[in-house]
Amino acid sequence: MSTNEPGNHDEALGSLLKEWSANAPLPLHFQEAVWRRIEVAQAPAAASVWTAIAHWIGTAMPRPALAASYLAILLTIGATAGWTRGRHEAAQVNGELGERYIRVLDPYATPRQ
Amino acid sequence: MKKGVFILLLGLAAAAAAYACVYFVCTSSARNLQRSSQPELAWLKQEFHLSDSEFKRISELHAAYLPQCAEMCLEVDAQNQRLRALLAATNQMTAEIESAITESARLRGQCQRNMLEHFYEVSRTMPPEQGRRYLEWVQDRTCLANEGMMSGQ
């Protein structure tokens, strides 16, 4: 029977592996390198959060009730921000024009030479 | 997914549009004031709710007052320069400094008198309630307030 047959080959390899032992020292920073690789391997778990969000946008967002609420809330936020900013600027302009009226009429309202 | 993203972006666009529209409406009045030929008078009309005829009369009073106010400004400037020169030339009180101080006070008094007359005239042109409010407002903000002329201080 030839040693090239599959059964014989496995047995020979098995006995060879049993005899083998690793005496070479581990490379420098071997453990750190292993942990780094583990961390890298776990990174896709973070990406799965984005996947979940994308999935939620794709499935929940198109629901009419949620879409309408979302639009209404953003419209309100935009309008409120515009109103606050607009009122503030209008008040500022009014104040400046009032001061200007006084400066036109009162020689002592403007610092003189 | 595409529909969800579209709604997401539509919401942001709606918020931006709402912001722009409301901001535009809130500031339109201020922009109109600034665009007018005499913004301070346009402001006065809006602030004290003047009718067109009241505004016309007040504009005339304003236009009549400005030349004498400008003349007063020149006098005040010239007097300030005189006083500054006198103060720089010495380190003690002199008769000239005393007389310059007296002249400065006279100019200030005259200026206050002219202003007050103008303010009274303008306030009488306004509806009574607005006229009272106008008088309080100008007295708080002009050199009349510093002298306490109207507040009895």
Image: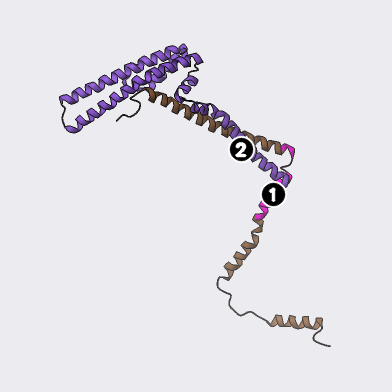
Chain colours: A brown, B purple
Kind of element beneath mark 2: helix
In x, y percent, where is residue A48?
68, 54
Q: Which residue lies furthest to the bottom in this view?
A: A1
The quarter in which the C terminus of chain A is drawn is top left
In this view, the residue in front, B28 or A85, is B28
Calculate the distance from the C-alpha at mark 1 to the C-alpha at mark 2: 23 Å
Would you call the spot at circle 1 few (<14 residues within 10 Å), some (14-19), or many (20 or more)? some
Would you call the spot at circle 2 few (<14 residues within 10 Å), some (14-19), or many (20 or more)? some
The magenta segment: A47-65
Q: Does the magenta stretch include residue A64?
A: yes
Overall secondary structure of the magenta section: helix
Judge whether A72 appears above or below A31 on screen.
above
Disc 1 residue type (three-letter): Ala
In x, y percent, where is residue B31?
52, 29
Residue B122 in which image quadrant: top left
On residue B16, the disc is 2
Q: Is residue A79 left or right of residue B81?
A: right
Note whether residue B71 is visible.
Answer: yes
The residue that appears at 74% across and 38% down in the rendered structure is: A64
Q: In this view, does A97 lie to the left or right of B70?
A: right
Q: Residue under circle 1?
A: A54
In x, y percent, where is residue A17?
71, 80
The answer for which chain carries disc 2 is B
In x, y percent, where is residue B108?
29, 21
The residue that appears at 67% across and 40% down in the rendered structure is: B10
Judge whether B91 appears above or below B95 on screen.
below
The residue that appears at 15% across and 24% down in the rendered structure is: B95
Disc 2 residue type (three-letter): Ala
Residue B64 in which image quadrant: top left
Kind of element beneath mark 1: helix
The residue that appears at 80% across and 85% down in the rendered structure is: A4
In this view, the residue in front, A19 or A83, is A83
